[in-house]
Image (tube, rainbow, N blue to C red):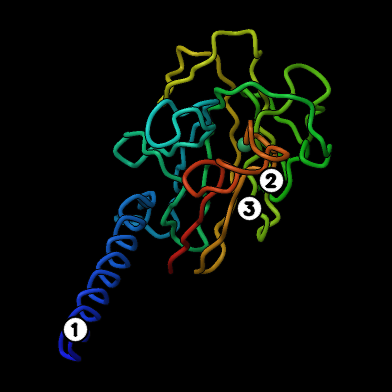
Amino acid sequence: MGRGGRLAVLGVLLAVAAGLVVFTVMAFIRTSPSTVDFTTGHQPGAPVDLTLQTVGSIGFGPHPSWVSYLTQDPSGQWVHTTLWDLPAHTRVNVTIYQYDSGSPLRNQQWGQVTGTLGDDATLNGKTFQVYNSNTGNGVGHTFSIPTLGISVPLVGNSSSANLCAQAPCTTKSPHNIVKFSFMTPGPGQYPWQCFVPCGLGFLYGNGGPMQTVGYMGGFLKVVA
Ligand SMILES: [Cu+2]
């Protein structure tokens, strides 16, 4: 093969490589979870209502058996995402429908409510500041924003109950309702996550859904 021929082959190979890179990047962008926008039309000073649910197995998508959070968008639709645009310096009233079971915490620290307004939360309407996970059905997940010092334990349902395994779950399934409020800080990206190693089947329970945005963690995208 002459020099021109070899250059032509090289050119084709480079084009294929570039195409593969573009395809991979686009595939990644396409599958990454969407962001629910709570900023459009927000009146300064008004609180934002953020409603979430946790489910023991999402029941659809690439990992149907994975544990997950879901977010209710402002129109009331449940979205499989953990990414939110939120206004800065704004009160966020969080409601979490917990449809999963629980277990004793490996670290009792995570039984504490910290960083919320009043340093407390409500569990099915009753105010609490700490939950002893060695009692009752234990704790299924936490909602934690480490950089803001916020953490709230999500008390589990009885594992012998007929638990929801197909999101979005409805209140017909056994559930606990956990409510609390916090203030968003200034603009920035703040990671949040669950600290209960609930990634069943992964090393120490910390792989899979515990490491994947859209399942057991996400970001607050706080905008001015
Ligand atoms: Cu979890």
**In-front residue for pair 23/162:** 23
Q: What's the residue type where badge 3 is placed?
A: Ile
How many marks on residues?
3
Q: Is residue 201 left or right of residue 138?
A: left
* Quarter-of-image position of residue 23: bottom left
Q: What's the residue type where badge 2 is placed?
A: Ser
Residue at position x 40%, y 39% in the image:
80
Asked if the beta carbon under badge 3 is closer than 8 A to the nearest atom of ligand 1, the reply is no
Q: Is residue 191 left or right of residue 214?
A: right
Check disc 2 and report the residue beneath it.
Answer: 151
- Label 1 CA crowd tier, 10 Å (few <14, some 14–19, many 20+): few
For the N terminus, give its image quadrant: bottom left
On residue 1, which mark appears?
1
Check disc 3 and report the residue beneath it.
Answer: 145
Q: What's the residue type where badge 1 is placed?
A: Met
Q: Residue 174, position in %: x, y? A: 55, 14
Label 2: which secondary element? strand
Label 1: which secondary element? loop
- Label 3 CA crowd tier, 10 Å (few <14, some 14–19, many 20+): many
On residue 152, which mark appears?
none
Q: Residue 15, position in %: x, y? A: 22, 74
Label 3: which secondary element? strand
Which residue occupies the extreme bottom position in the image?
A: 3
Residue at position x 59%, y 44% in the image:
181
Q: Nearer the viewer, mark 1 or mark 3?
A: 1
The picture quadrant for ligand 1 comes to top right
Labels 3 & 2 near each other (Cβ < 8 A): yes
